Image (tube, helix red, strand yellow):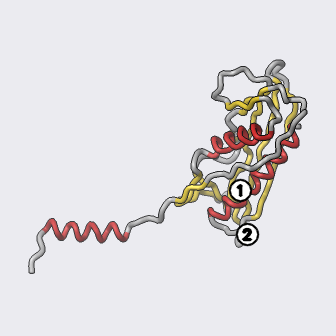
Amino acid sequence: MKISKPLAFIIILIGLLGCTKEPALKVYSLDTPTVTAVYGNRYKNKSIKVTYPQSLKDKVSQKMNFSYSSIDSGNYQNSEWSNNMRKLLQGTFVEVLDESKLFKVVLSDTSTVKEDYRLESTIFAFQHRVRGEHSNAVVSIQFNLINTETGNLVKSKRFSYSESTPTTDAKGYVSATNVAVSKLSSDLMDWLK
């Protein structure tokens, strides 16, 4: 029995495609922490604009970063964030501040409305730190509250967290990162009061 060249080509192609199929890409996002509304505070009639977070040390993007040592790091190939992490963090901060009712209105930096205060943030660390059988989600962000009328710094604080992961894979990292961001959100609200 003779097989035609097109049929042989199709059979080989199907065989190659079956062997080269990569694992599906898993996409994760941050859970927006729930916060309790705060009424009767000094900012209740003021507006705040949350700027796009800057990054100094770690490369922060849609890719999930991990490190095995201070000089050995990389990105997960089959897992990533649902958006650029800086955009996810900015959205989380806007939503948490809005729910807290600390300010009359909370704006993102794309708004053209003149704000009373500006909340700037700088990311110092945002990664999955794996050391042997143990791993942690590491989050370190500094916030600056600026009075936009005077241009003066009202206050500044750096928040750092290292949460143990339930597993050393990307899913465990996301779980621990959500715990860290929840603690960060709560501490940020307390600091702003």
How busy is the neighbourhood of tag 2: few (under 14 within 10 Å), some, or many (20 plus)? few
Quarter of the image with the C terminus is top right
Element carrying mark 1:
helix
Q: Residue at x 40, y 66 (%)?
A: 21
Dot placed on the residue nearer the N-terminal end, 2 or 1: 2
Q: Residue at x 74, y 45 (%)?
A: 124
Vertical placement of 10 versus 107: above or below?
below
Residue projecting furthest to the bottom: 1
Q: Residue at x 87, y 33 (%)?
A: 155
Disc 2 target residue: 134
Residue 162 position in % (x across, y down): 78, 58
Q: Left or right of 10: which side holds 185?
A: right
Residue projecting furthest to the top: 149
Residue type (three-letter) at the residue carrying disc 1: Thr
Residue type (three-letter) at the residue carrying disc 2: His
Disc 1 target residue: 177
